[in-house]
Image (cartoon, rainbow, N blue to C red):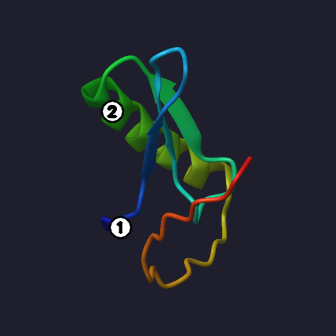
Amino acid sequence: MNKTFNVVIEKDLDGYYVASVPYLKGCHTQAKSIDTLIERIKEAIELWFEVNESFAINEFIGIQRVAVAV
């Protein structure tokens, strides 16, 4: 059975792309290219399920960017 997950992708200061799956705690990876990143996050998701037997997925509502002074 296939499941679809939302993946957040960011670029860090060193130029690496970083992917994380918000609904799977601790599921993240990084790579120098988007293509490699997608391969690695798929692998990370599969490995996450090997370690975690039960999970609950929240309903995705959306993403909002918020600006704050820092």
Q: Earlier in the sequence, mark 2 or mark 1?
A: 1
Residue under label 2, please give it.
Answer: 39
- Residue 61 point in image, percent of width and height: 44, 83
Disc 2 crowd, CA 10 A, few/some/many (<14, 14-19, 20+): few
Which amino acid type is shown beneath numbered disc 1?
A: Lys
User: Quick check: marks 2 and 1 in contact, CB under 8 Å?
Assistant: no
Q: Residue at x 66, y 64 (%)?
A: 53
Q: Residue at x 45, y 70 (%)?
A: 63
Dividing the picture into quadrants, the one containing residue 38 is top left
Q: From the viewer's perspective, tell me whether residue 45 is left or right of residue 37.
A: right
Q: Which mark is residue 43?
A: none
Dividing the picture into quadrants, the one containing residue 34 is top left
- Residue 64 point in image, percent of width and height: 47, 70
Residue sitting nearer the eye, 53 or 62: 62
Looking at the image, which residue sits at the far right? Answer: 70
Looking at the image, which residue sits at the far left? Answer: 35
- Residue 19 point in image, percent of width and height: 48, 41
Q: Secondary structure at mark 2?
A: helix
Which amino acid type is shown beneath numbered disc 2?
A: Glu
As drawn, 70 above or below 34: below
Residue under label 1, please give it.
Answer: 3
